[in-house]
Amino acid sequence: MRRHVAAPVLLAFLIAGCAADDGDASSQAPASSPSSAAAASPGKAPRDPLALPEKPDFLLPVTNGTDSRALPVFTPAEKVYTIHALCTGRGTVTIQYGPRDSDPSKITCGDPVTIGRVYTAPSEQKHLSVKVNGTGVHWSMAILSGTHAM
C-alpha cells in the first residue's frame, strides 16, 4: 500500500503553524497541553517546543540531531501516525518517507513547530529519514501513534 500524507498535512507543513518555538529544541521536558502551557506562571519550565499532547503514545520518542540520518524503525498500530518536528539554524530539514520518495516534507528552520499526519499501512516503517540542508541546523522530532488534536 502506498503511503500518503493528507492534504491538511501538506498545508500544515507549508504554513507550519501550531505553536511558536519559544524554548530549546533539545528539551525533552514532559509534554503539556496548550491550555496548561498558556497558564504557566513566570519562572516555570518553558513550554514544550514540540507541542506534544499531555500523554503522548510515542512510536519514536523525542529525538534530536544536527546531521542527516535514517530514523529508527517503528511499526504503527493504526493506519496513521503523527509527526511533530522543529528545526533551528539557517536551512531546512526534509523528512523523506522512503528511498524513492517523490513528495518529502520540507521544514524551514526558524518556523513554528510542524505537526503532520501520515497515513500508511500499519506495517514496519523502516525507510524514514531526515535530510539536513544548511548551516547550524539542529532538529527535534517525535512520532506519535494515531491522531490527536492539532
Image: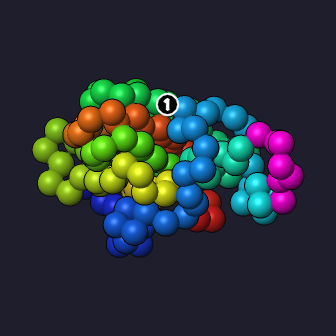
| Magenta stretch contains residue 42 | yes
In the image, 105 versus 134, the foreground residue is 134
Residue 102 seen from this side: yes
User: Is 35 located above or below residue 26 in the figure?
Assistant: below
In the image, 46 versus 61, the foreground residue is 46
Quarter residue 97 falls in: top left
Residue 138, position as x, y percentages in the image: 40, 34
Residue 36, position as x, y percentages in the image: 81, 57
In the image, 137 versus 78, the foreground residue is 137
Q: Which residue is mark 1?
A: 63
Q: Tag 1: residue type?
A: Thr
Start-end of magenta stretch: 39-45
> Seen in the image, is 33 located left or right of residue 141?
right
Count the marks: how many?
1
Residue 24, position as x, y percentages in the image: 57, 38
Residue 133, position as x, y percentages in the image: 22, 40
Quarter residue 137 falls in: top left
Task: Tell me the chief SS of the magenta region.
Answer: loop
Within 10 angstroms of label 1, few (less than 14), some, or many (20 or more) residues?
some
| Magenta stretch contains residue 108 | no
Image point (61%, 44%), residue name:
23
Residue 71 seen from this side: no
